[in-house]
Image (spheres, helix red, strand yellow):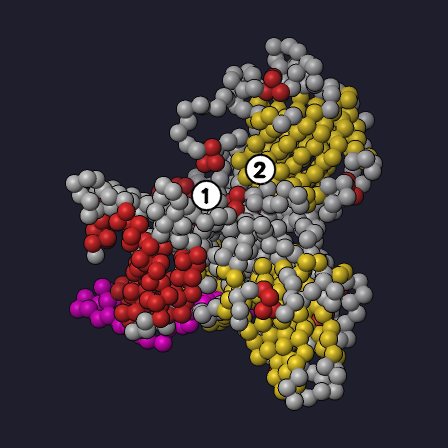
Amino acid sequence: MNPEISAWEGAQFIDTNTLTLDATSALLFDIETDFQIVEGNTASLIIGANYFRFNDKFQNINNMGGENYLRLEIDISGVGSSKGALLNIYRVGFDKDDSAKKPYMSISKANYPQTNINALITPGNKSQMNKLRIGVNASNIVIKINGEMLLLEPEDPNNPIPPQFREVGFSVTGVGGGNFLTYPHINSIGFAAEPGTKAIFKDYKILNAGKSDPNNNEVFGKDVGATYAIFKDFEGVSFNQDGIIELGNTTDATLIQYADPSHGSATMLRSEFNTGNKNIAKAKLYVTSMGSNEVYINGNRIGEDWFAPGATQFRETLGYYAYDVTKNINQGKNVIGALVFPGWYTGYMTYTPANFIFFGDTEALLAKLVITYEGGNEQTVVTDPDTWKIFTEVPVEYGSFFQEELYNTLKEKHIAVDGKTNGWATTAYDDSKWSNAEEVLSRDWIDFEIVSRYDRPVRVVENLQATEVMEVHSKDERTYTYNMGVNMVGVPSITVPQGWLKKGDTVILRYGEQVYPGLEGDEPQYIDRYGYKNGKGIAGRILTENYRAAMATDFYIAKDDGQVVIQPKTTFRGYQYVQVTLPNHTGPLPLENVMGLSLSSDELPSGTYVATTTDGATGELANQLFKNIRRSQLGNFFTLPTDCPQRNERMGWTGDAQAYTRTGTYNSDTYNFFRQWMVALRDDQGVGSETEAPGGIGSTAPTYNMTDDTSFANGTTWAAAVCMVPWQLYTQYGDTKVIEENMETMRLWLDGMDHYDFNEEYTYLSSKTDGLADWLAMDNNTPPELVNNAFTFI
């Protein structure tokens, strides 16, 4: 089909432009408010409260459970004296040393002699209305007062690290950035007030950060999202239509109050159409989305694909799928509908938290249904705001690859017909409470072609059953961990028997590739560090620290006490161990109730390999290595050839791909998988500039750049994927198509490498040979220049 949107015969991308907020998973955000201290000397905000990880001691690697929050208090009692202003940070419920009475840290001239806090809060403005901005980026907290950043020490003008890569602000966890577990998230928000104090907050709002549209980034405010209504039951709090919140404490105790500002959900879309009494010869559905989609016709799911239309370099290319739906179309009235969720398009992506909502703030669906009647006449149904409706209070309240799926069955009543949750996509459903769809425009810098994909979609390739219940469980016997036997990529499918849940119960699923060592029989160093006598007391629990900033947790809210199957559908996990918390049942699930659906763009290999050695043991190790390789391929061939399926990365690294391409072909038919990935690599090839040659290839494909790369990326071993992947595919399959498609791309890169001479003497060597090179080498004795130039000659 023509790659231009005109080929979709008037179809438009539709959904809603209204933003949603999942406060539990939000690790990147800004809070803005004006504040004024009217009586007393302090004003306080609460963020990050009621975080599930700290509510339960068993979920917290610091072994603390109970009330938890972060309180930021501005204290002006010393302003005008040598004491000066104070910013007190109270951390509660994170660690055993936390206290609601004693600050975790106090930013003042006394504690940080070079801070600028006294230039920000002065005798002249201390009682006036001031602007406060709290920016949180994966545990790093930046405070601005009246537009100026609060510094603990002056900026170093000679700092060689570019500003965008500097660690700024402060952290209340001891670490910050995407390589670690993160805190605070937004979670619940509110206020604190000491006895006898009164403060005014004006225009309090929460904003999306990352790559959000500055003209559409407010997710909570006076009239936005959950609105100030979440504060209506707070003691001593009042608010008005002018956006002013007044907080006064006339009691003898400190008031700490907070509420959840989350709102919205994934979007369901539907449209009705009529075929009359005509006989249908054939019907074909073309569908894609900015985000991922599941499509339904007359209550039936179309296709077996997960996360369609897959990942591409969305700046340049958007894939689509086509389905034969002849058997799904009825004479007379019909309904077509879809569930749309973030996928690879919105939400968090890569190890850089600031890439949040990189390609778009909201998702959108594009579809064209072509019905051909006997006799040759056609009817076309397309997505447009006039004939489609949307609903944003659906059971999937949030779905994210990195963070969570939150499925709330209490909302199934809004979409079900006669108890069937696909009823919303049938003619029996009443959509009078649904809203009109809106056109959703792509970002200004996105100009994709819409093309059919070559590769196999992500599908279920294997059903696994848990092999054991792990010995370590919560003291209340409500949280147990189950071993799936292999490191799998996919989702759990967990059957909870009737009577084990009650209305409103929240089931929590967490994941780990390993459990913490330190039990009896483990190495002494681990017993000392994680054991229960002298260590942290977490041995045997799931290890989540290697997931870094990916929360990798799923929630299921029960509507009654009936038997349920919990199976996320808007996310995927990389794990061997799944931890299940049932809040009102003691004892583990039967193993047959804990299943796993393995997902992949690949297929299970059909070949076998058996190594036999005279000592036996070496052969067993080789056989296990072979199994591990195939398991890794199955899990990491996931629309892209990724480096990992579990943490906040999951990127298409060029070095990994070129090194493994040939091996992969022996395990399964990978021709079209890599052929598709080469589309992203071509899309990301550098275009050059007046000073740089065109043809550069970066370390990942797709990259996260808003414009074509004008530089020529350094490094041969990784960039050589542009030549090595097509060559290996041609060598194995003998099909010249992959060479023809990439010949110009290969030539541009080779010419570019030749353009940059090493020096006047060695002109046949390239100077563009730094970079990642022999990544993860066992030692540092192999310089990048040697590895890269050797690779060039090969």
Magenta run includes residue 733: no
Residue pictured at 30% horizontal, 60% vertical? 724
Q: How many marks?
A: 2
Q: SS class of the residue under badge 2?
A: strand
Residue 522 visible somewhere in the drawing: no
Q: Position of residue 325 (x, y in %)?
A: 61, 79
Q: Earlier in the sequence, mark 1 or mark 2?
A: 2
- In front: 641, or 488? 641
Up the image or down, 276 lies above or below 600; here it is below
Residue pictured at 56% horizontal, 19% vertical? 116
Magenta run includes residue 602: yes
Residue pictured at 17% horizontal, 69% vertical? 614
Please identify the residue farthest to the top as the structure is shown: 81
The residue beneath circle 2 is 136
Which corner quadrant of the image does residue 291 belong to? bottom right
- Mark 1, other Cα within 10 Å: few <14 / some 14–19 / many ≥20: many
Whether residues under marks 1 and 2 lie with C-beta atoms below 8 angstroms apart, the answer is: no
Which amino acid is tagged 1? Asn
- In front: 363, or 738? 738
Which amino acid is tagged 2? Val
- In front: 760, or 476? 760
Residue 343 visible somewhere in the drawing: yes
Left or right: 398, with 240 as reference point: left
Q: Which mark is residue 507?
A: none
Q: Quadrant of the C terminus?
A: bottom left
Which corner quadrant of the image does residue 508 belong to? bottom right
Q: Position of residue 484 (x, y in %)?
A: 46, 64
